[in-house]
Amino acid sequence: MKIAVFPGSFDPLTKGHEEIIRKAVALFDVVYVAIGENAAKHCMFDLERRLQWIRQVFADEPRVKTCTYAGLTVDFCKRMGASYIVRGLRNSIDFQYEKDIAEANKQLVPEIETVFFASSPELAHVSSSLVRELYHHQADYSKYVSFEL
Ligand code: PNS
């Protein structure tokens, strides 16, 4: 069984995240979409709503499982028996940042490999922060999110 973890804040889940999850589930047997609880990071949407949205979007895909975790992503991977961490790349800025995190995770647990999926050009400008900004200003965010916030 090839088990992967896609960690993130998902504040909220965007169509960009959805694309990455669909690409990942084509390659892995199980993908845990895992909301990392970060005490230092204040999220706009509470944990339960973020979980529910992911469950709603992937209700038709039993191999996508949704959960939360605290602590290091690699420790969560070990608990779930996952050998892969999935991350999405939109541009070279993401790559620079993600490469360093992947290397840090590799130093912590060499057996866990980070696998990157490139987002399609149509979704490369989409981010949770963009959606939060639109939502805050009561602007239309429906192009970027598959559910009502
Ligand atoms: O949606 P984000 O903000 O990109 O997700 C961030 C997340 C949850 C993936 C990140 O904060 C994280 O991995 N937190 C757990 C701590 C950790 O393992 N850090 C990397 C190694 S130092």
Image (cartoon, rainbow, N blue to C red):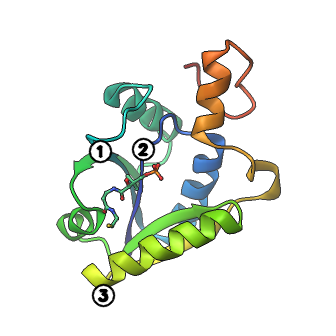
Tell me what residue is drawn at x 26 percent, y 80 percent: 108
**From the Cβ of disc 1, is ligand 1 less than 8 Å away?**
yes
Tell me what residue is drawn at x 58 percent, y 61 percent: 88
Query: In the rendered structure, which disc, 1 or 3, sits on the residue that comes first in sequence?
Result: 1
Q: Amino acid at mark 1?
A: Asn
Q: In terms of secondary structure, where does tag 3 sit? A: loop
Q: In terms of secondary structure, where does tag 2 sit? A: loop
Q: Give coordinates of residue 135: x percent, y percent.
A: 62, 19
For ligand 1, give the image quadrant.
bottom left
Quadrant of the image containing the C terminus: top right
Q: Is residue 133 above or below residue 27?
A: above
Q: Amino acid at mark 2?
A: Ser
Q: Give coordinates of residue 112: x percent, y percent.
A: 33, 80
Q: Amino acid at mark 3?
A: Pro
User: Label 3 belongs to which residue?
Assistant: 110
> In the rendering, which numbered label is found on residue 9?
2
Tell me what residue is drawn at x 51 percent, y 64 percent: 87
Query: Which residue, as the protein is rendered here, is positioned at the far right?
Result: 122
Q: Place residue 102 in its image quadrant.
A: bottom left
**From the Cβ of disc 2, is ligand 1 less than 8 Å away?**
yes
Q: Is residue 110 above or below residue 69?
A: below
Q: Are marks 1 and 2 in contact (CB under 8 Å)?
A: yes
Task: Tell me if mark 1 has few (under 14), some (14-19) or many (20+) residues whose alpha carbon lies within 10 angstroms of its own.
Answer: some
- Between circles 1 and 3, the one closer to the viewer is 1
Query: In the rendered structure, which disc, 2 or 3, sits on the residue that comes first in sequence?
Result: 2
Residue 100 as seen in the image, left or right of residue 41: right
